[in-house]
Image (cartoon, helix red, strand yellow):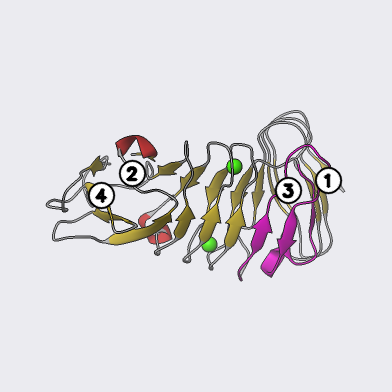
Amino acid sequence: MITGDTGNNVLIGLDSVDILNGGDGNDTIEGGRGGDILSGGNGIDTLSYENSMSTVRINMAPAGNGNITLASSGDATGDTVTDDFENLVGSVRIDFLSGNNGNNVIVGGGGADVMDGSGGNDTYRFRSLSEIQEDLIVFGSGDKIDLQAIDAITGGSDDTFTFVSGPLTAAGQLHFVGGFVEGDVNGGGADFRINVTGAASLSASDFIL
Ligand SMILES: [Ca+2]
Ligand SMILES: [Ca+2]
């Protein structure tokens, strides 16, 4: 059993059954393979399946009522996860990641992930262009799509996207049309799409650009 200290810890398990407890601080905990027992403890904690080689299905329990988060498939198979995590990181495959009524940061990673933050002000974060693979986001009021890590215009310095209401006419533009967020990083039209359900319209304020 590994227990983090009061600081911010990164705890990564082995292939066997691990018991990982973040303790205080903002911890990132990844059990790896095996049926792990994972607890975030106090702070803003991240449950990660970053290195899972296959799909994970995570459905966060409501916080603070003793429920157990549902975790199955891939490295999540057999895991027992307590309700004291806030954020999720999926694998390189297609993952099904659901938050709870708190404010969750959800990183799908690679694959066409299905992400639903549920209630609260949730953030759907893409860390690179290659992580946008027509993921499906169930968008709620107060949620944000975080594209800050992505260079809006490929090459040169790190550019910021500009949200436009009409068609994409230049590199660095982003719009929402027909249920899809589309962005152009090199001119000549859309280079990526994110399927967004639950929002009739989106504006620049719905993004972290
Ligand atoms: Ca994924
Ligand atoms: Ca939430």
Position of 70 relative to 61 (above/below):
below
Residue matched to label 4: 175
Identity, as a three-letter code, of the amino acid under mark 3: Ala
Dot 1 falls on a residue whose secondary structure is: strand
Question: Residue 183, located in which quarter of the rendered image?
Answer: bottom left
Judge left or right: residue 103 versus residue 153. Answer: right
Residue that label 1 marks: 2
**Alpha carbon separation for disc pair 4 and 2:** 8 Å
* Residue 56 magenta-highlighted: yes
**Furthest residue in direction front, as rendered:** 200
Q: Is mark 4 within 8 Å of ligand 1?
A: no
Give the secondary structure at mark 2: loop
Of callouts 3 and 4, which one flags the residue occurring earlier in the amino acid sequence? 3
Which of the two discs, 1 and 2, sits closer to the camera?
Answer: 2
Question: Mark 3 to mark 1: distance in Å?
Answer: 23 Å
| Residue type, numbered disc 4 | His
- Circle 3 sits on which residue? 61
x 59%, y 37%: residue: 103
Q: Which residues are magenta?
A: 54-83
Mark 2 lies on residue: 202
- Disc 1 and disc 4: Cα gap in Å? 45 Å
Q: Nearer the viewer, mark 4 or mark 2?
A: 2
Q: Is mark 2 within 8 Å of ligand 2?
A: no
Q: Quadrant of residue 7?
A: top right
Marks 1 and 2 sit apart, C-alpha to C-alpha, by: 43 Å
Foreground of the two, 83 or 15? 83
Q: Earlier in the sequence, mark 3 or mark 1?
A: 1
Coordinates of residue 194 in the picture (x, y in percent): 37, 58
Q: Earlier in the sequence, mark 2 or mark 3?
A: 3
